[in-house]
Image (cartoon, helix red, strand yellow):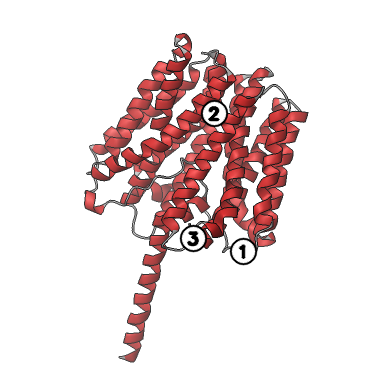
Amino acid sequence: MTHILPIASLLFGSALLLLAGGLQGLLLPLRGSIEGFSDTSLGLLGTGWAIGYIAGCVLTPTIVSRVGHIRTFGVYCSLAAIAVLLNLLIIDPLIWIPLRSISGFCFAGAAMVVESWLSERATPETRGRVFGLYTMINLGATTAGQMLLTLGDPAGFLFFAIGSIIYSMALLPTALSTAAAPVPLAQARLDPRALWRNSPVAVVSVFLAGMSNSAFGTLGAVYGRQIGLSVTEIATMMSLALLVGALVQIPVGMLSDRMDRRIVLTGLTGVACLIGSALSFAGSLPAAATIALVSAFGGMIYSMYPVIVAHANDHSPPGEFLKTSGGLLMLFGAGSIVGPLSAALLMSLTKPGGLFNVTSLAHLAIVGFTIWRMTQRAAVAPENKEDFISMPSGVRFSTPETLAMDPRAEEEREELMSEMGTESRDKGIASDD
């Protein structure tokens, strides 16, 4: 408890961000569907979010270096609140798509500021517990935000107003904080050639997983509405997918530490492919059966990303966790830009199963490529593996600062400092000689 109290206000601010983000992420596709937006327009909402989110991850460190953490965070929360209200005032897909990009940009930047504060306040001894608690709080807040929709009608103004209020409330903990501003924000840079040399499986899989996860995250609610689920059933379905995905990471991580992670990844994607194929024909299934299948689907897709990251880091040189994981995050974001639009285009032709046709094709491609690579490269010995750590699943849940909070990043920094100290001592001895 002593290590939680100093960061309680920051955790509360982060929870409010994710609460508003969870609400808005489910509200907009549902309301857009009610208003008669085309499937393509609804898919572009997810594409716009991913573009804005990646831009926020890339540009926020520069903005913070110029105006500071508190001002940046306040501006981002204010703009996000304004964007939610403009979604209500101007119900037009041509306006909603750029507004969704603004929301993604502000959400990513605000999350990075909070995470940088948490990372600065955590000590090496408490970093693992802080990272785990932060992940749990964000998952719970996102789920709560989605479940808020069960309390009313998304066709009205209520949830837009609530979303704007929550974004505005999120700036209060940091605005009133007396803590010193943290160090400059972490930056993720994409080096595709280096990532490919390190792990072709990780490069291909993380892009395709980004396609699948973002398509489902954006259009899952639209799918539910098209097959006749109620708002409560849709919110329950999407929330259970997240929760099961978080819970499944525990046994998946234990298994992947003991055997070739590529086998585990193949198993996850293979099962997801089978479930997605079943869901593409789920219009005639009872609602409870559909929700159960989607929950299992979420368990598979939301546990893929940490397995991919762990596999890539098994092959990366010492001291390159942040570089490797940050590059994979950017590739996941690139897939997140493509996925919703691809699924939306197919849904417009083969309603509503087109969503899961896209995810199944992506998962089938991961299975095929991974199996082929297993014939080209031997597995990493268990004693040479990095420890698997449960982590948020890519864009919408991770930023470069999330990676900087990871205990493996702290170990990397400690090893680097140790090496620098050893080199300094060696130089000192050499000069004495």
Percent position of residue 59, x then y? 61, 51
> In the drawing, does residue 97 fall left or right of residue 43?
right
Which of disc 2 and disc 3 is earlier in sequence? 3
Seen from this angle, which residue lies furthest top? 284
Relative to 421, residue 385 above or below: above
Residue 146 makes an appearance in the image: yes
CA gap, disc 3 to disc 1? 16 Å
Apparent side of residue 40 relative to residue 208 in the rendered image (left or right): right
Residue 142 position within the rendered picture, expressed as x and y whole percent measured from the top left: 55, 37
Counting residues from the start of the chain, the first of labels 2 and 1 encountered is: 1
Pick the residue in front: 206 or 36: 36
Are the residues at dot 3 and dot 2 in contact (C-beta closer than 8 Å)? no
Kindly tell me whether residue 396 is visible in this rendering. no
Residue at (74, 34) in percent of width and height: 85
Q: Which mark is residue 2?
A: 3
370 or 290, which lies in front? 290
All told, the count of numbered labels is 3
Residue appearing at x 37%, y 35% in the figure: 248
In this view, the residue in front, 192 or 425, is 425
Cα separation, mark 3 vs mark 2, equals: 43 Å
| Distance (Cα) linking label 2 and label 1 | 40 Å
Q: Kindly identify which numbered label has been placed on residue 306.
A: none
Going by the numbered disc 3, the residue's amino acid type is Thr
Q: Which residue is mark 1?
A: 179
Disc 1 packing (10 Å; few <14; some 14–19; many ≥20): few
Q: Which mark is residue 340?
A: 2
* Residue occupying image coordinates x 53% and y 13%: 227
Occupied quadrant, residue 281: top left
User: Nearer the viewer's eye, disc 3 or disc 1?
Assistant: 3
